[in-house]
Image: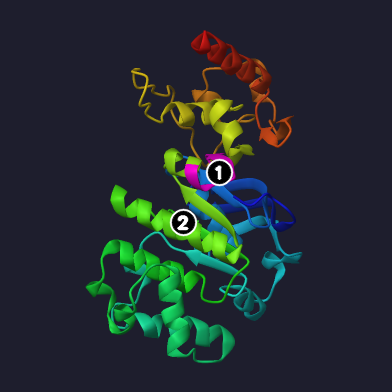
């Protein structure tokens, strides 16, 4: 994987709320992270943690009753949240593209595959691409040229997902956001689609944000992982550090949920109940379910650097890391 270089995408304080009759749901709350040139960043967390909402905010695709209430999203120094709609449209696809989760729902069932890709290119460049360009895109994502005149319903789920990848790279963007692009597929097809995304990333040198639940897939695909819980980013670390020594209790629970091929152990279940998203607790967002909770957890817990390149929003991160190291020593002995 490519070593991180310049910052391509800088997200600061991004907050997306959804209005309800009884108060705002804080779907994404004060999220901040960087995406480096040539890097793949994994965004993980349980369902409802705010991953997709955060990326919808980055793309300015939040639908009513949702709204972006704060933050900035800089792509190569340009704040996307401050752009007029027409200027933002020029940034989409050409600099910032999305690979959606549900390929069947994203593709127009009444249009041929080639026509849909051509429409993306024509809309953003004003020029109709030649047939050779579309066939080149098919080849890049491992699709046969015969699908040029086929409709979405004639393709398998994996092929439809690779069509969406082809559309995402059609204008050679700087950043690609893959929103759980493999979650609706069986494990064999997941591997094919994941390999396709890795091939595209390496060939084009794009930066990528991968959203997902599959920690095993993240371990193979990404350079760093950002963990979200209830709208908050609670830890960011290099993938090796995250799996070897997670510093936040929620990250540790996610890592422990990955089945082991070598050790037999009981399923670990998180206690406590999730708080009301309209009324989050003061201080640490995870305190109501945290096995390490202490009185100081009622104070604000900003992301802070625990080790070089590892940030965690936890006042007891050092104790957790020490416990992880001790457990590894016992296992090695």
Dots 2 and 1: beta carbons under 8 Å? no
Give the image location of residue 54, x and y in percent.
Answer: 56, 53
* Residue 130, above or below 159: below
Q: Position of residue 185 (x, y in %)?
A: 31, 54
- What's the CA distance linking mark 2 and mark 1? 16 Å
> Which stretch is magenta?
220-230
Quadrant position of residue 113: bottom left
- In the rendered structure, which disc, 2 or 1, sits on the residue that comes first in sequence? 2
Q: Residues within 10 Å of mark 1 (few under 14, many from 20)?
A: many
- Determine the secondary structure under disc 1: loop
Residue 311 image-quadrant placement: top right
As drawn, the label of residue 266 is none
Question: Dot 2 lies on which element?
Answer: strand
Residue 284 pos. (x, y %): 62, 29
What's the residue at 39%, 21% (across, down)?
268
Q: Can residue 211 be seen? A: yes
Q: Is residue 66 visible?
A: no
Say above or below: 72 vs 313.
below
What residue is drawn where x is 68% and y is 20%?
Answer: 318
x and y percentages locating residue 136 in the rendered image: 45, 78
On screen, 34 above or below 255?
below
Q: Is residue 270 left or right of residue 288?
A: left
> In the image, which disc is placed on residue 231?
1
Picture quadrant where residue 201 is located: bottom right
Q: Residue at x 63, y 81 (%)?
A: 86
| Front tag of 2 and 1 | 2
Of the pair 123 and 133, the residue shown nearer to us: 133
Q: Is residue 171 above or below residue 20?
A: below
The residue that mark 2 highlights is 179
């Amino acid at each position: 994987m490519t070593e991180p270089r310049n910052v391509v995408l800088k997200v600061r304080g991004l907050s997306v709320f959804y209005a309800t009759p009884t108060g705002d749901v804080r779907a994404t709350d004060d999220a901040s992270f960087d995406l480096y040139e040539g890097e793949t960043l994994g965004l993980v967390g349980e369902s409802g943690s705010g991953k997709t909402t955060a990326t919808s905010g980055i793309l300015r695709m939040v639908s009513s009753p949702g709204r972006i209430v704060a933050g900035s999203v800089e792509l190569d120094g340009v704040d996307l949240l401050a752009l007029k709609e027409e200027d933002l449209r020029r940034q989409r696809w050409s600099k910032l593209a999305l690979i959606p989760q549900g390929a069947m729902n994203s593709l127009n069932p009444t249009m041929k595959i080639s026509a849909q890709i051509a429409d993306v290119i024509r809309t953003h460049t004003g020029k109709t691409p030649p047939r050779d360009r579309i066939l080149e895109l098919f080849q890049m994502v491992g699709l046969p040229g015969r699908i040029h005149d086929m409709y979405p319903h004639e393709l398998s789920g994996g092929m439809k997902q690779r069509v969406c990848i082809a559309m995402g790279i059609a204008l050679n963007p700087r950043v690609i956001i893959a929103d759980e692009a493999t979650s609706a597929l069986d494990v064999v097809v997941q591997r094919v689609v994941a390999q396709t995304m890795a091939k595209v990333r390496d060939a084009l040198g794009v930066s990528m944000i991968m959203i997902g639940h599959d920690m095993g897939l993240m371990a193979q695909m990404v350079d760093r992982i950002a963990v979200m819980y209830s709208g908050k980013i609670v830890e960011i670390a290099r993938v090796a550090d995250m799996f070897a020594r997670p510093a936040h209790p929620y990250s540790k629970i996610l890592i422990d949920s990955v089945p082991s091929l070598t050790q037999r152990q009981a399923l670990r279940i998180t206690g406590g109940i999730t708080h009301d998203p309209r009324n989050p607790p003061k201080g640490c967002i995870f305190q109501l379910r945290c096995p390490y909770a202490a009185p100081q957890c009622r104070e604000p817990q900003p992301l802070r650097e625990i080790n070089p390149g590892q940030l965690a929003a936890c006042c007891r991160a050092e104790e957790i890391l020490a416990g992880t190291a001790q457990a590894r020593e016992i296992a090695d002995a």
